Image: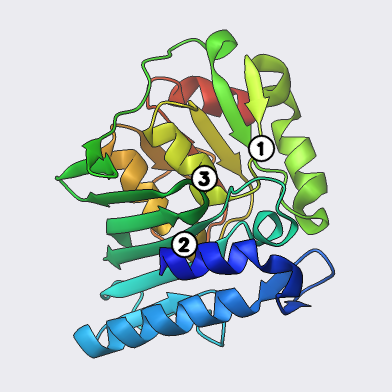
Amino acid sequence: MAIFVRTKYAMRDGMRVSTKREANDLLTEVDLAVQEEIVARIRTAFPEDQIFAEENGLHELPANRDGRTWLIDPIDGTQNFVRGLFPAFGVSLGFAVNGKPVAGGVAVPGKGELFLAEKGGGAFRNGERIVVSDVDAMGSARAEIDFSGPWDREEILQKFSPLMVAIGQVRCHCAAVIGLCSIATADMDAYVHVALNPYDYAAAMIIVEEAGGLVTRLDGSPIHVFDGGRGVLASNRLLHDALIDVIV
C-alpha cells in the first residue's frame, strides 16, 4: 500500500483530481483506490464489523455507535499530496469499540514511517517505542494549529488567536495525522482543530494516548468518536490544563 501511494505521489502531475465541497476540498484517484483496498480487506477478515470512511458513501454514521467500527482516512493531507509542498500526508486506519479507539495505524509513505498502537500496548514508529515530550511550560511549547479550509477559518482564528499569542512556537502541517503523531514522537507538544471527523483522528488518537499523551474535546471532555463533537485537543498531557485555560 505504501509503495503504491509513494509511486502515485511521484507521478502526481498526471493524477486525476476532483473536488467535493468546494475548490479546496480535493479528492484523488489514490484516495479512492486506497480506501477500496482497505475496505475489501476488512470485509474479508471481519465481515460483521462496521466501517466508517471518508469516501464512497461510507461517511454516514454507523447504526451502532458503540459497535466494532473501523475508521479510514485513505489520504489525510490531500492538499499536500496533490501539490507536493512536502510529503506530509498519511494513510489512517483506526479501530474503535464503544466509541473509543483501541488500535490504530498511520502510514506516512513520503517519510517511510509506520505508526502503530493498541490499547495497553504502547505506541511505536517503525518498531521503535515512542513517548511524548516532557515540556510543561506554554512559553517553551510547540503547538500545531491546523488552519483547515476557508469553511473553518473564521472559527479557528476566533478560538485559537489567544493560543497563538501564548504558545512558544506555532506550526501547521495541514494533515491531522501528521500533527497528532508528531506529539507522540515528542516533536510537537500540542495539536488543536475545531472540526475533525472521526476518521481524521481515531487512529492517531490511540497513538498519542499510548505514547503518554491525552486527547479530548476542546473543553477537556472525553471523546466518543460518534458523539457529534468535532473539536479536538491533543497534548503531551502536562500542558493540557493550561491549553484549555487559554482556549476555553
- 134 relative to 75 in the view: left or right: left
| As drawn, 1 above or below 223 | below
Q: Which circle marks residue 151 in the picture?
A: none
The residue that appears at 47% across and 65% down in the rendered structure is 199
Image coords of residue 106 (percent x, y): 39, 55
Q: Amino acid at mark 2?
A: Val
Secondary structure beneath label 1: loop
The residue that appears at 30% across and 65% down in the rendered structure is 96
- 180 relative to 164 in the view: left or right: left
**Quadrant of the drawing holding the N terminus:** bottom left
Q: Which circle marks residue 172 in the picture?
A: 1
Contact, mark 1 vs mark 2 (Cβ under 8 Å): no
Query: Which badge, 3 or 2, comes first in the chain's sequence?
Result: 2
Q: Amino acid at mark 1?
A: Cys
The residue that appears at 68% across and 54% down in the rendered structure is 80
> Whole-Å distance between the Cαs marked 3 and 2?
10 Å
Secondary structure beneath label 2: strand
Image coords of residue 195 (percent x, y): 63, 54
The residue that appears at 36% across and 15% down in the rendered structure is 134
Residue nearest the viewer, comparing 229 with 121 = 121
Q: Which circle marks residue 91 in the picture?
A: 2
Q: Which residue is mark 3?
A: 178
| As drawn, 225 above or below 237 | below
| As drawn, 65 above or below 136 | below
> Whole-Å distance between the Cαs marked 3 and 1?
10 Å
Query: Which badge, 1 or 2, comes first in the chain's sequence?
Result: 2
